[in-house]
Image (cartoon, rainbow, N blue to C red):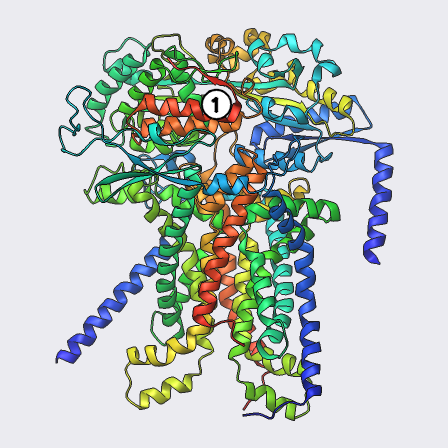
Amino acid sequence: MRRQTKKKIKKVLFWFVVIFVFVYLIFPFYWALNSSFKTENQLMMTPATFVPRDTEGNFAPTFENYKSVFTNPTFLRAILNSTIVGGVTTIIALIIGSFSAFALGKLRFKGKKLFLYLVLSMTMFPQVTVLAGLYAVINTLGLSAMLSMILSYMIFTLPFTTWVLTAFFKELPVEIMQSAQVDGATAFQTFYHILLPLTAPAMVTTGLLAFIAAWNEYLFALTFTSIETQARTIPVAISLFTGKIARQEPFGEIMAGAVLVTIPVVVLVLVFQKKIVAGLTAGAVKG
Amino acid sequence: MKKVLLTVLLVALLSVALFAEKTITVAAGAVGIELELARQAAAEFEALFPGVKVNVLDTPDMVQDRLGLYLQFFEAKSDRVDVYQIDVIWPGDLAQHFVDLYEYGAHDYAPNHFKAIVENNTVDGQLIGIPWFTDAGVLYYRADLLEKYGFDGPPKTWDELEEMAKVVMAGEKKNNPDFWGFVFQGNAYEGLTCDALEWIASNDGGTIVNRDQEITIANENAAEILEQVASWIGDISPEGVLAMDEEGARKVWQAGNALFMRNWPYAYALGNADDSAIKGKFDVSVLPHGKGESAATLGGWQLAVSKYSKDPALAAQVAFFFANYDHQKARAMESYNPTIKTLYQDPEVLEAVPFFGSLYDVFTNAVARPSTASAPNYNEVSTLFFKAVHEIISGESNDAMGTLEELALDIAEVTGFEPVFE
Amino acid sequence: MGKTPTGNILKQEQSLAYKLLIPTLVVLALVAIYPLGQVIITSFTNRVFASDQETKFVGFDNYAQLLGVTFKELEPKTDKETGEIIRDDETGQIEYERAIMVLPRTPNRYKELFQFNWFGKRIVVGARDPEFLGAVGNTLVFTFFSVLLETIIGLFLALVVNSNFKAKGLMRTTMLIPWAVITVVSARIWEWMLQPGTAGFFNMIVYRLGLSDGQASFLTNSALQMPTMVMVDVWKTAPYMALLLLAGLQMIPKELYEASEVDGAGKIRQFFQITLPLLKPSLAVALIFRTLDALRVFDVFQVLMSSKMYSMASYNYFQLIQNRAMGLSSAVGMIIFVIIMIFSIIYIRSFGVDQT
C-alpha cells in the first residue's frame, strides 16, 4: 500500500512540475497574444485584464494592431529577409561545420586542439565589441546588406555547429567507419552516406538553434541594414514600429508582430522536424 | 565571374545616375506622421528641382539606437547620408561631423527661429543645425480633480504641488490603489537629466555647468530640491517612477491614475483621443518653481548637413526647405512644435492646437541642457549627472550634498573644467 | 578493435582533414581577423569613436583604469573634544569617516566599491571603475543562476519529451514557443508584465489575490532586480538547453534502457547509470555554449535595465555609444574575452571534451 502512495505522490509531484513549467513557458506568450488585441487605452487599464475588455467589462478585442501589421510592407518584406538570411546562414554553417566536425571527430591529424580553441575563440567576444570592426570590413568589401548579415552571423553560428557536431561525431562508434573502410569506401563516402544520416537528429537540432540565433539577431542587422532598408530583418522592423506621434510606442502592434512571427515558426518546426529527421535517416545503412 | 559583371554593371549604373541625377539622403525619424510629412516635403522639393532626388531614410525612434547608428556612419566617414536629424543635445558633441550652415546661407533663415535654439545649435560661431521642431517640459494636471478637491488652479510651486498631491491622493486612493500624485521621468537616462535640470534650475540651483565653463552643481539649492524629490518617492510618486520614461509616465497618466505629470507636449493630443480615460479632463501649465523661476528643459530636433556629403550646398538647401515656414506649419497642425516664432501667432495653427498660444512663453524661456557648454563630452557629463540624481532620489545615497560634490569632481575629470564649491 | 592503419591511410586522413577545415578557416579569416585584431590594438589606445581626435598609444592605461583597485583602512570618527569614538545613537555601531576622504584622488581617482570588516578594522575597497567591476560581478552572478536553472529546466523538458509520458506532445510545443519569440520582443513582453502598478501582470495577480496593493517595482528594487533578470533570461534559454539535450538523449540507444529494465532497475537508477554518463558530451558542449552566451548577455540587460544595472556587454555598449570611448570599450571587450576563455578552459578540461 505504501508503495502505491509513494508512486501516487511522485506522480502528483511530477504533474505539478509539468504544469509549473508549462505555465512559465507559455504564459508570457499568452500575455503577448492578449495584449495584441488591445488598443492603447485598453493596455493602460488598471488592473490589467486577462482578455481585452472595454470600460464596462465586456469582451472587446480589437483587430487594428493586426491590420496595421499586415499592411506594413516593411514588416512583410522583413519576414522574407529574415527567412533568407536565417536559412542561408544555417545551411552554410551546417555544411562547413559538419566538414570540420567530421575531421575533428573522426580523423587523425595534428593541431586538433588548437583548431577547436581557435574556432571557439571567435565567439568569445560580445557582439558589441566587434561591431565597429565588422562594419569597416563590410564597407571595404562593399558587401550587400544581406551578404553582410549572412557572413557576420557565421561568427556565432559556425563555432556552435562545429563544436556540437564534433561532439556527436565523436560519439559515433568507430566500428561503423572501419567496417565501411574495409568495404572499400573512401573517407568522404563514409562521411556522406553513413555518418551524416546517423547524426541527423543532431544536425536538425543544431540547424534549428543556429537558424533561430540568426533569426533573433538585432545589433548587426540594425547597423548593416541602416541604408539598405529593404534588407531589414524582423527584429529591426519591429523596433521601427512607431506610433503616430513621436515617442509614442505602439505596444499592441509590436505584440501583434511578434505573435504573427512566432506561430508559423513553431508550426513549421513541429510539422517538419519529424519529416526532416526521417528523411535524413532514410539513407542510413542498417546493422 | 558573375560578381565581377555585377559590380561593373552597378558601377556603370551608378555613374550614369550620378551624372544624370543628384541624390540627397535625409535621415529622419521613423514615426508615422513625422515620416509622412518628411516624405511630402521631399516630394515637393523634387517637384521644384527636377534632377534632384530626395530620399528619406527612417531611423530607429529609440535615441540610443539612432545615435549608435549615426556614430557608425561618422566612424566610416560615410557619404551615404547627407542630412541628419539631430537631437538638441548633439550639436556640441558631434560638431566636427557637420558643416557650418552659415556658409551655405543660414544667415537668411536663422533669425526667424527661436534665439535660444539657434544659440544652442551654434558651436564656436558655426551653426551646426537649423532648428526643425522643438519641445519643452510642461506640467499636465487633472483640472477636474483639482476642482473636486477645492483648488483654484495648477500649482505654482513644488511645495504646492506636493500639498495638492497629498490631499487628492488621500481621497482617490480609497477607490483606486493605482492612483498617484505625480509621475515623471525618473529612470536613469537622459530624460532624468531633463526633469532634474528643471527642478534644480527652478530652485536657483544653476544648470550643472554654466557658460563660463564652471561646474556649479554642488550647491545647497540643488541638494535641497533633490532631497525633496527623494521624499516624494513612495509618497506622492510610485516607486516605479524610478524606472519610468516618457511613455511609462504617460501610461499611468492616461489611464487616469495620476494627478500631475511632467512630460513633453506630445501627450496632449494623445490624451484627448476618443477612447482615452482622461479626455477633456486635463490641461497643461508651466512647471512649478522653487526659489527661482519656472524652468522648462529644451528638447527638439534640428537638421544638420554631413561634412562627408558629396554635395553639401544642395543638402543645405534641402535642410532649409524642410525647416521653412510652410513645412513647419504643416507639422504644427500635427502637434509638432515649430521653431519659427511667427507661427505661434498664426490663426490656423492656434485653431488646430490651442494650447500652443500658452506655450509660447515656455519655449522662449526654455532652459538648454549644458550640451554646448560641455562639448564634446556632453553625453558623458549627462550620464554622470543622471546617475547621481538617480542615486539621490532613489535613496541609494542619503547624502545629497556629498553625492553632488563627487559628481562635480567626476565632471571635472571628464571636462577639465573647474568645480565651484559653496 | 580495428586494424592499425598503414602510413598511407594516415596521410590520406590528414590531408582530407586539412582540406575539410579550410572553409572554416576562410570564414574565420574574413569575419574574425580584422575586427578582433582591431579590438586588440585599439584596447591599447585612447581612440574616440567617430572622431577626428588623434589616437595615441597608451599601453595598459585602459586596463589599469578598468581594473585598478586599492584597499584603505577607515578610521572611526572621534569626538573632537572628548576623543571618544562616536557611535550611532540607534544601532550603537561605530561611525567611520567618509570613504571619499581616504581614497586617493591624484593622479587617479578611486571611488568606493564596497566596505567590509576585517579583524576589527574597517576596510574600504576603492576602484577606479566601480561600475565596470560591478558589471563583472553582476554578469558572473547572473551567469551562475541562469545556467543552473536553465540546465535543470532544460533537462526536465528534454527527458519528458524523450519519454513516453502523456505530457510529451504538449511539452514539445511548449518548449518551442519561447525559443521562437524574437529576443528583443521577449524582453519587452517581460518588461510589460513587470510593470509597477496593476497594469502589469504580476502586480495585478498579487493585487487580485489581496496580497499587496500591486505597486511593486521589480526593476528598481535592488533585491528583485537580479532574480527578475534571471527569470526573464531562463524563459528564453531553457528551450535552447532542452533542444540540445534532447538531441543528445535521442542518440542513446533504447536497447540499453530495455536491457536495464529487464535487470529490474528503476527510472532513477537508469537516469544516473545510463542517461547521465552517455549524455555527458552533449551536456558538456551545451554548458559551454550556454555559459558563453550568459557571460555575453546584452539584450535583456540593455532593454530592461539600461543604465541602472550593467552586464559586461551592456557596459561595453554604453562606453562605446554614450561616451564614445573606443579604446576603453575595446579593453572591456578584451577583458570579457579573457574571462570567457578562462571559463571555457575550465569546462573543457573538466569534461574532457578536447580529448582526442
Q: Is residue A21 above or below residue B214?
A: below
Q: How far across and down, in percent of the image, does residue C2 sit?
A: 57, 92
Q: How far across and down, in percent of the image, does residue C72 sit?
A: 33, 37
Q: Quadrant of residue B249?
A: top left
- Identify the residue shown where x is 81% and y is 26%: B50
Please indicate whether residue A2 sits to the left or right of residue A31 in the image.
Answer: left
Q: How far across and down, in percent of the image, does residue B311 sit?
A: 78, 26
Please indicate whether residue C344 sits to the left or right of residue A281 in the image.
Answer: left
- Identify the residue shown where x is 56% and y is 32%: B31
Please indicate whether residue C77 sits to the left or right of residue B401 in the image.
Answer: left
Quadrant position of the C terminus of chain C in the picture: bottom right
Q: Is residue C284 above or below residue C143?
A: below
Q: Is residue A205 above or below residue B275?
A: below
| Residue closer to the observer: C340 or B57 | C340
Helix, strand or loop at disc 1?
helix
User: Which residue is under mark 1?
Assistant: B412
Q: Write down the chain letter for disc 1.
A: B
- Identify the residue shown where x is 83% and y is 57%: B2
Residue A65 in sight from this viewpoint: no
How many marks on residues? Answer: 1
Residue B221 in sight from this viewpoint: yes
The three-letter amino acid code for the residue at tag 1 is Ala
Q: How far across and down, in percent of the image, does residue A186 sit?
A: 69, 85
| Residue closer to the observer: C172 or C24 | C24
Quadrant position of the N terminus of chain C in the picture: bottom right
Q: Quadrant of residue A136?
A: top right
| Residue closer to the observer: A248 or A184 | A184
